[in-house]
Amino acid sequence: DGGITQSPKYLFRKEGQNVTLSCEQNLNHDAMYWYRQDPGQGLRLIYYSQIVNDFQKGDIAEGYSVSREKKESFPLTVTSAQKNPTAFYLCASSILFSGTTQYFGPGTRLTVL
Amino acid sequence: EDQVTQSPEALRLQEGESSSLNCSYTVSGLRGLFWYRQDPGKGPEFLFTLYSAGEEKEKERLKATLTKKESFLHITAPKPEDSATYLCAVQWNSGGSNYKLTFGKGTLLTMNP
């Protein structure tokens, strides 16, 4: 059963903490993405990776970091430098980077206490 | 100025009352236009991809069409389970081999019981 999994579903962070959100896909897709969704705004791209061991900043990368050591996995770390991290985080993947459909995971809701 | 604009922001329909959702875009170098459905607290679910003006795709009560500057998602005889937020996204060439996927803010469709 192919798809994208994200964990945890809910995450609570204290001020000054770094937290890592997991994203795994078994679709054999080359490209993976992280988006942030806030009420009343469109999805905004944080980071993307076209291939293993390579990734690029999206529109709102400040305060976030990623790694792509395996094709299946693209974890996102929300660092203490991210001033307003409370949001719904979505991971997506696509066969290729350009012109192909992105499929989304179920999301992680991060709340700062 | 938003590059992808969805209208209306919210729509309330009676069961069986057909309507259309609009997605207009100002970007050039279109690589693809994508429609998604998103239920509260969940990741977007892929509906359609359109690549060129004049293209149409259908799935059950939904039909997506594309012109040079906008797309419509037609909902025929909607049912209560069609209640969701419908997202439009446009992938375009932002220069050289760079591609961006820009999302609209979505249309919230609510079906009256």
Image (cartoon, coloured by chain):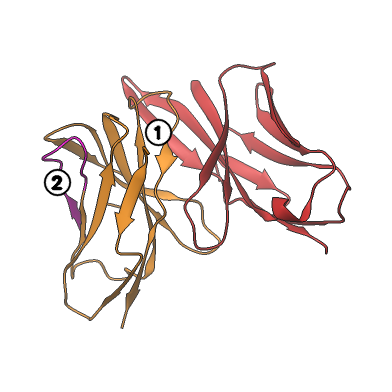
Chain colours: A orange, B red
Where in the figure is residue A93, as x and y percent of width and height? 34, 37
- Left or right: B111, with A50 as reference point: right
In this rendering, the count of numbered labels is 2
Query: Can residue A66 be found in the magenta stretch?
Result: yes
- Which range of residues does the magenta coloring cover? A62-74
- Of badges 1 and 2, nearer the viewer stands 2
Tell me which residue sits at (14%, 46%) in the image. A67
- At 15% across and 41% down in the image, what residue appears? A68
Picture quadrant of residue A81 = bottom left
Residue under circle 2? Answer: A67
| Residue at point 65%, 36% (across, down) | B24
Q: Position of residue B15 (x, y in %)?
A: 86, 53
Q: Nearer the viewer, residue B76 or B11?
A: B76
Q: Are marks 1 and 2 in contact (CB under 8 Å)?
A: no
Indicate the position of residue B34 as horizontal and vertical percent values: 55, 33
Q: Nearer the viewer, residue B73 or B16?
A: B16
> For the residue marked with disc 1, what is the amino acid?
Lys
Q: Residues within 10 Å of mark 2 (few under 14, many from 20)?
A: some
Mark 1 residue crowding within 10 angstroms, few (<14) / some (14–19) / many (20+): many
For residue B105, above or below residue B95: below
The chain to which mark 1 is attached is B
Q: From this viewpoint, which residue is outermost toward the front?
A: A1
On residue B21, the disc is: none
- Whether residue A108 is visible, yes or no, is yes
Residue B34 part of the magenta-drawn span: no
Residue kind at label 2, given as amino acid type: Ser
**Residue name at image x 21 percent, y 45 percent:** A74
Is residue B28 in view from this perspective?
Answer: no
Based on the displayed image, in which of its 4 quarters is residue A96 positioned? top left
**Which label number is shown at residue B100?**
1
Q: Secondary structure at mark 1?
A: strand
Q: Nearer the viewer, residue B40 or A2?
A: A2
